[in-house]
Image (cartoon, coloured by chain):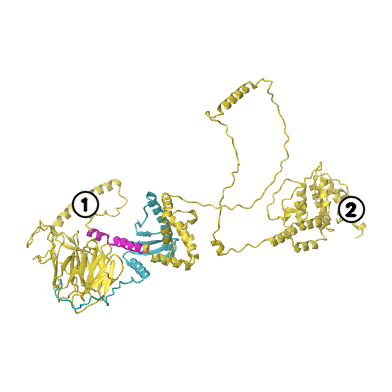
Chain colours: A cyan, B yellow
């Protein structure tokens, strides 16, 4: 146990101690920060968030590429989800990874959006 | 013009006409010249008495081609004459009858067979304009024609209209019926005056055309009730059966009849009762009648029904109160259209109408024409949603896995499989390839053996796998490390200076093995962190000891940055910091050197108050210049070591080729040590 009597008798809450983690005050900023961080990781070519209609909400690539990826991956995700659910309707698709010779496309699908990250893992 | 002159002029014309007349081998329709007839004929410019007498039907339109164009007129008349095929009293009557009386057609027996018209124009649609046209041309047209024209305008006589309907409905597709005199006459009339009539008909139509109502947005969004009811059953086709089951009630009767018929057929030949004879029947004259209807608009709609679609539909009743929430966004300004679409899409069924992303062009058009106001709210909502956060989290982890895969695999002690040599040249033959494969396999085996032999000769070494560090932790001094008791992948790191002189802001982070580049939790504080530890009883609680003598306890399950408990009854000794954790006591030792014992030892976990020291260190790892190693921690269930330094990095080293206890021949007491290593890091010297 403690050897000597404590110097501060009162057990008051610490006034100075107000730990604030960066960016947690505003969830929007945290999201932006996370996306920026993802983009800065090794080998990441680009990332994008696309809504259910194929319109990009956030993207780091140019518009035509974004639109192309969005359209194609939306179809593929729908097909993949359909496949998973056909086998077992209680199951659902959570993540989709397409690894090709040159890079890997990772898709986090949802009913309202698609989060797509393209990475070159061999760098 | 004097009549004489006129007649002179007309003589050669008459001759010409005669010629023309005689050459055409057509029967001349000789009609009794009624007063009306003669009246009509007087309108003609021609004073050819012969012609006047012989012509039954007068084409008043020809009057336009007047005195100058005799020849043409004659040929025209000849033409018109050919048209007159069937002399029928009723036709002439039709033309001669004054306008006020309705025309009626009677056949030989006096039965009214007036053809009913196909077109009923609106009696209120006529305006003054066409009348003007009419009055200007009055002089050129025959009176009868005027009469008939005014008829059309006044729409009193529908039967007369029947003749002129074709010219009026110039744009609509009026079918051509079989050749009849009315049609032919109308055609004739139509030719030169077609344009005029067209004009009037157009103006007529233009006036009556109603402007389409403007459809407002509210109208579009209005809910329109469509009530479907069952109509009575209409029978289109009835095909009675010609076969009766053997077990039916009437089977016996039917069989009997069949037998009788058989006998009849056999007896037919040579029987007096049956005589074959031909008969001719009169077929009534068929009449074609065509009907026109408005275009029936058809719409295709398809839906693909899948197993999960049905499953969703069954469950939607249960989930309806809760599914409304995720589909309706909180900040929905234009909520009318969007949630509906989302509901449809949430079903997951691929309705053909919603086949988006079918082509690049479509998408681009959509993007270009989309209004951004409504969309921005929606996209913000997406970015703020929890699911998105989770997806980002997973995505980052996946990326980390991709980047650090070999390192993490080494950490997890996964066996390393050697990769095949990439891309041999393609002009190798199959057999050669096979041989090569066999050779390679052999080589691999040899290599492995060699490696195995080498392994025993390579001294123990540390291989650096990765290090936990980020921008936040740069420059800080790692003061303590602690594993989570429940989750072996979770590591708590405290950053803070030991000495009293320099006190920077403190930081306590929770790192996960799965993401070595960014901590899972960050707890900042103005005071330096001296010690961190996870509770055993409640593994989600993290205790953080600060330099000023206070302690804070955080719940790492949620992401809040506020401690759930803090206390300040800890004594700060000069060179030791003691703090209390749940169910366990941990003494920190003099700061000059810290010693740890590997947890895989079989020693009792009573307070450590003895050290085991090697006189000959097995591995000496020198830190980078200017950086001191400050803390050390073993990893459980794996031969890895975590070393924290004064630059804010926590490096993970894999202990390789560590000798097992059998080979070990070190000094010091050995008490059933299976794999126990003791390390000493001399902070002051490094």
Q: Residues within 10 Å of mark 2 (few under 14, many from 20)?
A: some
Identify the chain of the residue marked 2, using the numbered disc in the image: B
Mark 2 — residue? B11
**Residue A104 place in picture, x, y as percent:** 34, 59
Tag on residue B299? none
Residue in the picture at 74% in, 46% down: B179
- Asked whether, in this view, residue B544 is left or right of residue B40, the answer is left
Please identify the quarter of the rendering in which residue B460 is found: bottom left
Residue B605 location (% of width, % of height): 14, 62
* Residue that protrudes farthest toward the front in the picture: A10
- Start-end of magenta stretch: B388-411
Is B600 in front, or is B417? B600
In front of the other: B121 or B450? B121
Q: Is residue B390 magenta?
A: yes
- Taking the spot 25% from the left edge, 60% from the top edge, the residue there is B408
Q: Give SS at disc 1.
A: helix
Local SS, label 2: helix
Q: Looking at the magenta stretch, what is its main secondary structure? A: helix
Q: Residues within 10 Å of mark 1 (few under 14, many from 20)?
A: few
Q: Position of residue B461 (x, y in %)?
A: 16, 62
The residue indicated by pointer 1 is: B444
Question: Looking at this view, is B54 or B581 the one in front?
Answer: B581
* Residue B345 horizontal side relative to residue A104, left or right: right
Q: Position of residue B174 (x, y in %)?
A: 69, 51
Queried whether the magenta region covers residue B316, the answer comes back as: no
- Name the quarter where the C terminus of chain A is drawn: bottom left
């Amino acid at each position: 146990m403690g050897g000597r009597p404590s110097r501060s008798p009162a057990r008051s809450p610490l006034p100075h101690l107000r730990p604030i983690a960066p960016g947690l005050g505003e969830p929007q900023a945290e999201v932006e920060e996370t996306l920026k961080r993802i983009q800065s990781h090794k080998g990441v070519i680009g990332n994008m968030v696309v809504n259910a209609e194929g319109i990009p909400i956030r993207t780091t690539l140019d518009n035509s590429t974004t639109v192309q990826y969005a359209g194609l991956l939306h179809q593929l995700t729908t097909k993949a989800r359909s496949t998973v659910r056909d086998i077992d309707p209680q199951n659902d698709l959570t993540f989709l990874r397409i690894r090709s010779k040159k890079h890997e496309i990772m898709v986090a699908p949802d009913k309202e959006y698609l989060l797509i990250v393209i990475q070159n893992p061999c760098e | 013009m004097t009549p004489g002159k006129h007649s002179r002029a007309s003589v050669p014309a008459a001759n010409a006409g005669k010629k023309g007349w005689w050459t055409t081998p057509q029967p001349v329709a000789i009609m009794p010249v009624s007063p009306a007839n003669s009246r009509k004929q007087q309108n003609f410019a021609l004073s050819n008495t012969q012609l006047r007498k012989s012509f039954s039907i007068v084409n008043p339109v020809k009057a336009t081609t007047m005195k100058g164009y005799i020849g043409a007129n004659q040929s025209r008349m000849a033409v018109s004459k050919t048209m007159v095929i069937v002399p029928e009293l009723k036709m002439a009557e039709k033309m001669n009858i004054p306008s006020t009386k309705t025309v009626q057609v009677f056949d030989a027996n006096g039965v009214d067979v007036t053809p009913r018209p196909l077109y009923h124009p609106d009696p209120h649609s006529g305006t003054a304009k066409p009348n003007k046209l009419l009055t200007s041309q009055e002089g050129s047209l025959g009176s009868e024609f005027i009469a008939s024209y005014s008829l059309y305008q006044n729409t009193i006589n529908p039967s007369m209209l029947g003749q002129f309907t074709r010219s009026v409905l110039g744009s609509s597709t009026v079918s051509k019926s079989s050749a009849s005199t009315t049609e032919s006459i109308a055609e004739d009339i139509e030719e030169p005056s077609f344009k005029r009539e067209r004009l009037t008909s157009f103006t007529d139509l233009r006036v009556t055309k109603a402007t389409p109502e403007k459809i407002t947005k509210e109208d579009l969004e209005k809910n329109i009730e469509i009530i479907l009811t069952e109509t009575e059953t209409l029978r289109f086709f009835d095909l009675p059966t010609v076969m009766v089951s053997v077990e039916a009630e009437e089977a016996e009767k039917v069989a009997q009849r069949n037998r009788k018929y058989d006998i009849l057929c056999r007896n037919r030949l040579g029987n007096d009762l049956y005589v074959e004879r031909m008969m001719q029947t009169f077929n009534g004259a068929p009449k074609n009648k065509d009907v026109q209807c408005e275009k029936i608009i058809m719409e295709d709609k398809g839906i693909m029904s899948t197993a999960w679609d049905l499953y969703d539909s069954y469950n939607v009743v249960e989930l309806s109160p809760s599914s409304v929430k995720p589909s309706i966004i909180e900040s929905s300004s234009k909520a009318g259209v969007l949630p509906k679409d989302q509901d449809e899409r949430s079903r997951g069924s691929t309705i053909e109408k919603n086949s988006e992303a079918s082509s690049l062009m479509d998408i681009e058009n959509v993007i270009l024409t989309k209004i951004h106001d409504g969309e921005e709210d929606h996209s913000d909502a997406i970015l703020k949603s929890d699911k998105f956060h989770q997806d980002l989290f997973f995505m980052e982890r996946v990326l980390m896995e991709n980047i650090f895969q070999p390192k993490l695999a080494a950490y997890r002690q996964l066996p390393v499989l050697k990769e095949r040599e990439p891309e041999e040249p393609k002009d190798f033959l199959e057999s050669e390839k096979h041989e090569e494969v066999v050779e390679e396999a052999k080589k691999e085996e040899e290599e492995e053996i060699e490696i195995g032999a080498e392994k025993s000769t390579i001294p123990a070494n540390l291989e650096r796998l990765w290090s936990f560090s980020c921008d936040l932790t740069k420059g800080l001094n790692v003061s303590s490390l602690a594993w989570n008791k429940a989750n072996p992948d979770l590591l708590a790191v405290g950053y803070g200076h030991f000495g009293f002189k320099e006190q920077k802001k403190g930081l306590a982070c929770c790192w996960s093995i799965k993401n070595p580049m960014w901590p899972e939790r960050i707890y900042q504080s103005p005071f330096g962190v001296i010690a961190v530890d996870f509770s055993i009883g409640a593994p989600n609680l993290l205790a953080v000891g600060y330099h000023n003598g206070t302690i804070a306890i955080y719940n790492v399950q949620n992401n809040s940055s506020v401690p759930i408990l803090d206390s300040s009854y800890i004594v700060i000794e000069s060179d030791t910091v003691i703090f209390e954790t749940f169910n366990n006591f941990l003494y920190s030792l003099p700061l000059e050197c810290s010693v740890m014992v590997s947890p895989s030892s079989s020693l009792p976990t009573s307070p450590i108050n003895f050290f085991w020291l090697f006189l000959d260190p097995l591995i000496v790892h020198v830190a980078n210049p200017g950086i001191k190693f400050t803390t050390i921690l073993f990893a459980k269930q794996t031969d890895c070591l975590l070393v924290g330094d004064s630059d804010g990095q926590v490096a993970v080293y894999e202990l390789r080729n560590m000798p097992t206890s059998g080979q070990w021949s070190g000094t010091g007491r050995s008490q059933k040590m299976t794999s126990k290593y003791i390390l000493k890091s001399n902070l002051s010297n490094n």
